[in-house]
């Protein structure tokens, strides 16, 4: 759901009316979506990020990328094999792994369609 004209608060709390009108469009995911994959490994020398097939220089130190990746690491729990029930990765091991993230959009980037928000949401969900 893309906000074309954003909601900016209430003109009247009593009457529950907005300051301005808002317009949003719900998009079909078969046409417009962000596809994000992530891999974690102790063998990766550093965190890396690719957007639409191009590696982003400095991503490993980007404030936004760091906040997302480090936040996920803090919340990470044991990874359990669904078939055997065995612990594949212990929670404390995630902090010793680096990640490689690749994200692409099936819609124009930097066109006001929240492409980076969609990619980061997909990363956190992964």
Image (cartoon, rainbow, N blue to C red):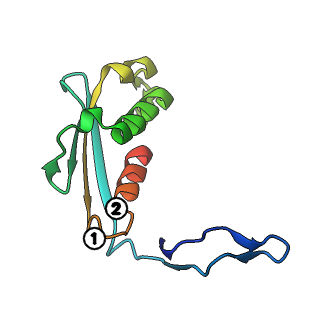
Q: Position of residue 29 (x, y in %)?
A: 38, 71
Q: Is residue 68 left or right of residue 62?
A: right
Residue 46: which quarter of the image? Answer: top left
Q: Nearer the viewer, residue 11 or 95?
A: 11
Q: Position of residue 98 (x, y in %)?
A: 27, 28
Residue corresponding to mark 2: 115
- Residue 107's disc is 1
Residue 47 in picture, x, y percent from top left:
25, 32
Q: Quadrant of residue 48?
A: top left
Q: Residue at x 40, y 56 (%)?
A: 117
* Residue at x 82%, y 77% (from the top left corner): 15
- Element type at mark 2: helix
Which callout, 2 or 1, points at the residue further toward the start of the chain? Answer: 1
Q: Residue furthest left?
A: 54
Which residue does the image show at 40% across and 32% down from the upper left? 81
Whether 38 is drawn above or below 15: the answer is: above
Q: For residue 81, say whether it is visible.
A: yes
Whether pointer 2 and pointer 1 mark residues with C-beta atoms closer than 8 Å, the reply is yes
Residue 4 image position (x, y, % from top left): 46, 76
Image mark for residue 36: none
Real-space CA distance between mark 2 and mark 1, rounded to the nearest whole angstrom? 8 Å
Q: Is residue 104 above or below residue 49?
A: below
Q: Nearer the viewer, residue 88 or 83?
A: 88
Q: Is residue 80 visible?
A: no
Residue 77, compared with residue 123, is above or below; it is above
| Residue farthest right in this picture | 14
Q: Is residue 117 above or below residue 82?
A: below
Q: Residue at x 15, y 54 (%)?
A: 53
- Quick one: SS at disc 1? loop
**Quarter in which the C terminus is drawn:** top left
């Amino acid at each position: 759901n893309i906000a074309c004209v954003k909601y900016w608060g209430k003109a009247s709390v009593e009457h529950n009316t907005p300051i301005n009108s808002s317009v949003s469009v719900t998009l079909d995911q078969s046409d417009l979506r962000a596809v994000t994959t992530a891999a974690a490994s102790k063998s990766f020398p550093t965190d890396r990020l690719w957007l639409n097939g191009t590696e982003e220089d400095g991503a490993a130190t980007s404030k936004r990328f760091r906040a997302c990746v480090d936040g996920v690491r803090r919340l990470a729990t044991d990874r359990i094999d669904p078939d055997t029930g065995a612990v594949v990765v212990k929670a404390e091991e995630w902090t010793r792994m680096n990640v490689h993230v690749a994200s692409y959009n099936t819609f124009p980037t930097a066109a006001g369609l929240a492409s980076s928000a969609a990619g980061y949401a997909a990363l956190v969900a992964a």
